[in-house]
Image (spheres, coloured by chain):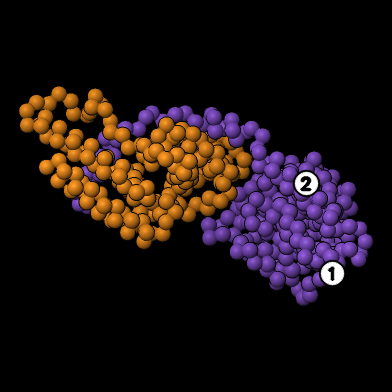
Chain colours: A purple, B orange
Amino acid sequence: MDDLERELRNLAGWLQTPEPPEVAARVRARLTAPAPARRRWRYLVAVLIALLVAVLPPGRAAIADAVAGLLRFAGITIATSSEPALPTGTPSPLPAQQPMALVEAQRKVLFPIRLPAKLSPPEQVLVADPDPRGTCRVATLLYRGGALRIDAFDGRLDPAFHKQASGPGVKWAQVNGDVAIWIGGPHAVAYVDRTGTVRVETARLAASTLIWQEAGVTYRLEGDPTMAEAIEIANSLD
Amino acid sequence: MSSSPSEVVLDDEELVIRARAGDLESYELLVARHTASAYRTAVLLGAGPDAEDVIQEAFVKGHRNLSRYRGESSYRSWLLAIVANETRNLHRSRSRRDGLVLRAAAADPVPEIAGDVAVETVLAGERRAALVRALRLLPVRDREVIVCRFFLDLSEEETVTMLGWPRGTVKSRTSRALAKLRGLLDREEVRRG
């Protein structure tokens, strides 16, 4: 280290910095104030609804025009097309998916894993796609011998699922007063990895699915329930 | 193991995980812990009287972006990067840049000295004033790297995170800034003769 560098380091102690202010309380007040981002989000959803209504009028003929219509919702992309594009072959599971006790699984993901009060405890809990530090991206709860599943992931990040829905089965719904999407009927679903690539090998035929978001976490409930039943389960998240 | 959870001092990583899960209490602890260094950073980068607003904004944005913090750098340098960015935004809307202010003589840590020592003290004081004048003349990016490496004492790695430049740029910018500073000081010495 030469003289100038030493002088500069020494100068640091001579530079005046006023007493630091107390900002913690004010920061907290701002964080608990109703977030403007949320209002923007609602506005966006309103635009999306308007768009969807515009591009998806009822009737099969009009649906064909919506082939290019890609809907993004809470970290899930939904491509609608008139022709059902169904996956073939045996789908592989999500990357590095493994079963785990609930407590252990909670340590693996950065969002809280919430259980619906309407259902008994899950029969199995899975986590998938860990980063180099072991933090997983998706948590999955399985019920009814796997006939009902709930996937959860941080939907504020990049999309994690890509859906190929066909027909007029895509509907807006409401969970806890917020917008949700119901896809009534079988459709293809594939996992979108961290790089944004759709993992074709994970593509499988999904049953009817309800998609909603709460506190930044996106949930997709898939299985045998009707739309009303699915919403009831979604509303009961603890 | 009888220590209750409240006695455990949580490290930044742990607080980040909790804050990300929605625990505002943990985030408030992080804010309190890093207020002083965030504030000093904003002041030294030239935020002046706006330093308080800058760090408040940085903490609010930091909370919003917490999900993007992957832990590949320390939380501190990640946060300081936001502070640096906010300070830059400030400069865009304001032409004047202040921040490098020498302590008033009254706060001089070596008071009441007589004779040769006093003369040396005066000379040292003049030299420091000259350094600050020269620093004020440096372009923003040169000053930023000097502030990081010498005033905030950040490592090269931390400086990479904070300024968002490649490692090579941090290295070359540091030596270039030092060379410019030397040039400015030489010129000043010649002028004062």
Residue at horizontal 64 percent and vertical 67 percent from the top: A197
> Going by the image, does B104 lie left or right of B52?
left
Quadrant in the rendering for residue B47: top left
Residue B33 visible? The answer is: no
Residue at horizontal 16 percent and vertical 43 percent from the top: B191
How crowded pointer 1 is (Cα within 10 Å; few <14, some 14-19, many 20+) is rated as some
Quadrant showing the C terminus of chain A: top right
> Going by the image, does B35 lie left or right of B20?
left
Same chain for labels 2 and 1? Say yes or no.
yes
Q: Residue furthest right?
A: A59
Q: Which tag, 2 or 1, sits closer to the chain's start?
A: 2
- CA gap between label 2 and label 1 equals 27 Å
Residue B81 visible? The answer is: yes
Depth check: B11 or A34 in front? A34
Q: Which mark is residue A222?
A: none
Depth check: B74 or A43 in front? A43
Residue at horizontal 42 percent and vertical 31 percent from the top: B49
Q: Amino acid type of disc 2?
A: Ala
Residue B187 picture location, percent across and down: 19, 47
Depth check: B73 or A221 in front? B73
Whether the residues at callouts 2 and 1 have beta carbons within 8 Å, the answer is no
Q: Which residue is mark 2?
A: A46
Mark 1 chain: A
Q: Which residue is mark 1?
A: A84
Quadrant in the rendering for residue B38: top left
How crowded pointer 2 is (Cα within 10 Å; few <14, some 14-19, many 20+) is rated as few
Q: Amino acid type of disc 1?
A: Pro
Q: Secondary structure at mark 2?
A: helix
